[in-house]
Image: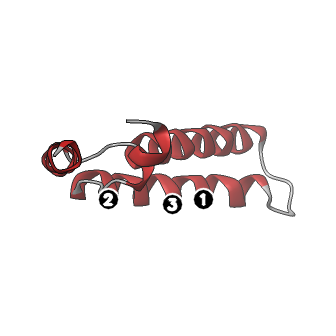
């Protein structure tokens, strides 16, 4: 299964929730990094880590697939 098919395949419920949490973390981190006011260096550092963690969490969650549906698709395509 290539990455395109994997990204388009159905995602389990747990990973859909995790993907939403990751997107939220990335959004919060991004908004802190883009804030027009001067923020402490520690907060900017934490915002960078939040953005990174949210992006990784989202990418990993998007590529998780349901095995049952993949097996059914593979069986039907081989017939």
Q: In the drawing, what numbered circle is on residue 24?
A: 3
**Mark 3 in CB contact with mark 2 (< 8 angstroms):** no
Q: Nearer the viewer, residue 43 or 19?
A: 19
Q: In the drawing, what numbered circle is on residue 75?
A: none
Q: Residue at x 43, y 39 (%)?
A: 60
Left or right? Give the position of 14 relative to 46.
left
Q: Nearer the viewer, residue 55 or 46?
A: 55
Cα distance between the residues tagged 2 and 1: 17 Å
Instruction: Report the coloring of the rendering.
Output: secondary structure
Q: Quadrant of residue 41?
A: top right
Mark with earlier residue (3, 2): 2
Q: Which residue is mark 2?
A: 17
* Viewer-nearest of discs 3 and 2: 2
Q: Is residue 75 above or below residue 31?
A: above
Q: Residue 49 location in percent, x, y?
A: 61, 37
**Mark 1 in CB contact with mark 3 (< 8 angstroms):** yes
**Within-10-Å neighbours for mark 3: few <14, some 14–19, many 20+:** some
Q: Secondary structure at mark 2?
A: helix
Q: Secondary structure at mark 1?
A: helix
**Within-10-Å neighbours for mark 2: few <14, some 14–19, many 20+:** some
Left or right? Give the position of 41 relative to 57.
right
**Within-10-Å neighbours for mark 1: few <14, some 14–19, many 20+:** some
Q: Which residue is mark 1?
A: 28
Cα distance between the residues tagged 1 and 3: 6 Å
Q: Residue at x 23, y 48 (%)?
A: 77
Q: Residue 76 location in percent, x, y?
A: 17, 50
Cα distance between the residues tagged 3 and 2: 11 Å
Left or right? Give the position of 30 relative to 60.
right
Q: Quadrant of residue 13?
A: bottom left
């Amino acid at each position: 299964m290539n990455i395109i098919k994997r990204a388009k395949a159905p995602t389990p419920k747990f990973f859909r929730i995790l993907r939403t949490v990751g997107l939220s973390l990335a959004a919060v981190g991004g908004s802190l990094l883009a804030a027009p006011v001067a923020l402490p260096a520690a907060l900017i550092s934490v915002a960078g880590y939040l953005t990174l963690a949210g992006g990784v969490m989202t990418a990993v969650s998007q590529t998780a697939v349901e095995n049952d549906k993949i097996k059914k698709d593979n069986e039907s395509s081989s017939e």
